[in-house]
Amino acid sequence: MAFGKFRLIASLGHGGMADVYLAVVDGRGGGGELQVIKRLRQELSDSSGHREMFLDEARLAVRLDHPNVVHTFEVGEEGGEQYLAMEYLEGAPLNRIASRARSKPAPPGVLLRVVADALAGLHHAHELRDHDGSILGIVHCDASPHNIFVTYEGHTKIVDFGVAKASTRANERRSRVPTGKVGYMAPEQARCLPLDRRADIFVLGVVLWEVLAGCKMWDRQSDMEVLRRLVEGDLPRLREVRPDMPEALARICDRALALRPENRYASAAEMRSEILAYMDEAGLHVSPEDVGRYVSELFADKREKIRSVIAQQLGGASEPGSTGLPQLDSCSRSTLRSMPTPEPAEPVDKRVFAAAGATVLFAALAAFTFLQSCTP
C-alpha cells in the first residue's frame, strides 16, 4: 500500500487517534529501509484539535535524539494526512521479557543493565532544553516496562512519549485526569499534582523492584487498593519479597520509591550511577551483546515468524486468500500507543473512584502533608 514515498507493508496497531504501520522507504541503491509510520486517522484529520495534539507530540519527538530513546526521522503530511516516521525496532518490550524470564531467568546483571540504559534515555529527555536554553521540563508519565524496548542487538530504548508532560506543550489536557497505568504511577501522579522528573524516577523504581523480585509489585490487587497504598506510602519492600537481595540493591529501590519526591534521586542519572556502581562492585560486566543474546534466545520463535512476514511483503508476496496488510506481533513494534488522545491512552478508570466514594478516598489522601497542595 503506497503512502507518499513509503510503502506500507504491515499493520502494527491502531490507537485512539493514530494508525501505526511498518513501512519501507526505497533507498538510492534500490534497497529499502524499514521505518514505522504513525498516521493520524483520516476521520480525525479535519479536526483542528486532533491535528494540534498530533503536532504537539511531533514537536517533542523530533527534539529527542539519544541512543536510548526511539528516534523520529521526520514529521510530514501526505495527501492531507499528518504522519511521523520513526525507527523500526526489532526486539521486545521489557514487560514481555520479564514474563518469559520467569521460566528462563536472565543471566546476572542483564536486566540491571536494561534498567540502567532506560534511565540514560529518561535523563536525556529530562535534561532537554529549548532553543533559549531553558529546560523543557519533560516528564514521560508512563515509563512502564511496556515502554522500555530492548532490541535483539541489546540496545534499550524508551518509547511512547505521547502522554508525556512538557512545559511547552500546547495542549495541557492532563491536569485533572491521572495518566498512565495505575501499577506504574508515582503518588503525586495518581493525584494529578504537578509532576517533575522525580515521578519518572519513582516509576523506574517500580520497574527495578519488579525485575529484581521476579514478579509484579501490585500483582492481583485492584486499582483502588493500589491507589490507596500509593498515597499512604505502603509499598512492599524488596527484601520482604526477596530476603536474599543484596542490601545495596534494596537501598536503591527504597530511595527511588520514596513517598516524598524530595527523598528520591534528584535525577535519573544519579539513580543510574548507583546501579552501575553496584554492578562494578559485584563484578557484573554486561555488554549490549550479552543483553541482545539473551533477548534473541527468548524470542527466537517470534523473530523468525516476523522476518518471514516481512520477507514476503518486501518480495510482493502474501498469504493465499489474504486481504489488506498483515498484522505483526507486538514484539516487533517500536511504538504503538504513543499517540495522544482526547482522553489519556490508559486513564485511571473513573469507576475506581466511584466505587469507594470520592469523599473517603480524598479524605485519606488529604491526611498526608505532602499532598496538601492538591489541585481542588
Image (cartoon, helix red, strand yellow):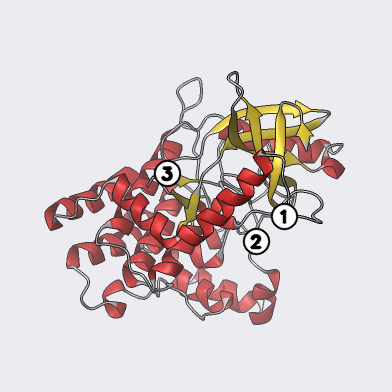
Q: Are marks 1 and 3 in contact (CB under 8 Å)?
A: no
* Viewer-proximal residue among 182 and 39: 39
Q: Are marks 2 and 3 in contact (CB under 8 Å)?
A: no
Q: Is residue 94 left or right of residue 247?
A: right
What residue is shown at x 51% (from left), y 81% (from top)? 220
Between circles 1 and 3, the one closer to the viewer is 3
Whether residue 60 is visible to the viewer of this picture, yes or no, is no
In this picture, is 275 found above or below 208?
Answer: above
Q: Give the CA separation, mark 1 to mark 3.
A: 24 Å
Q: Are marks 1 and 2 in contact (CB under 8 Å)?
A: yes
Name the spot of residue 32 as percent of width and height, x first.
60, 30
Q: Earlier in the sequence, mark 1 or mark 3?
A: 3
Q: Amino acid at mark 3?
A: Leu
Q: Earlier in the sequence, mark 2 or mark 3?
A: 3
Residue at the disc numbered 2? 347
Q: Amino acid at mark 2?
A: Pro
Q: Amino acid at mark 1?
A: Glu
What residue is shown at x 59% (from left), y 27% (from top)? 31
Q: Check disc 1 and report its element: helix, strand or loop.
A: loop
Between circles 2 and 3, the one closer to the viewer is 3
Name the spot of residue 277 as percent of width and height, x first.
18, 50
Q: Which mark is residue 122?
A: 3
Q: Give the CA separation, mark 1 to mark 2.
A: 7 Å
Q: Is residue 290 left or right of residue 48?
A: left
Q: Which mark is residue 277?
A: none
Residue 255, quarter of the rendered image: bottom left
Residue at the disc numbered 1? 343
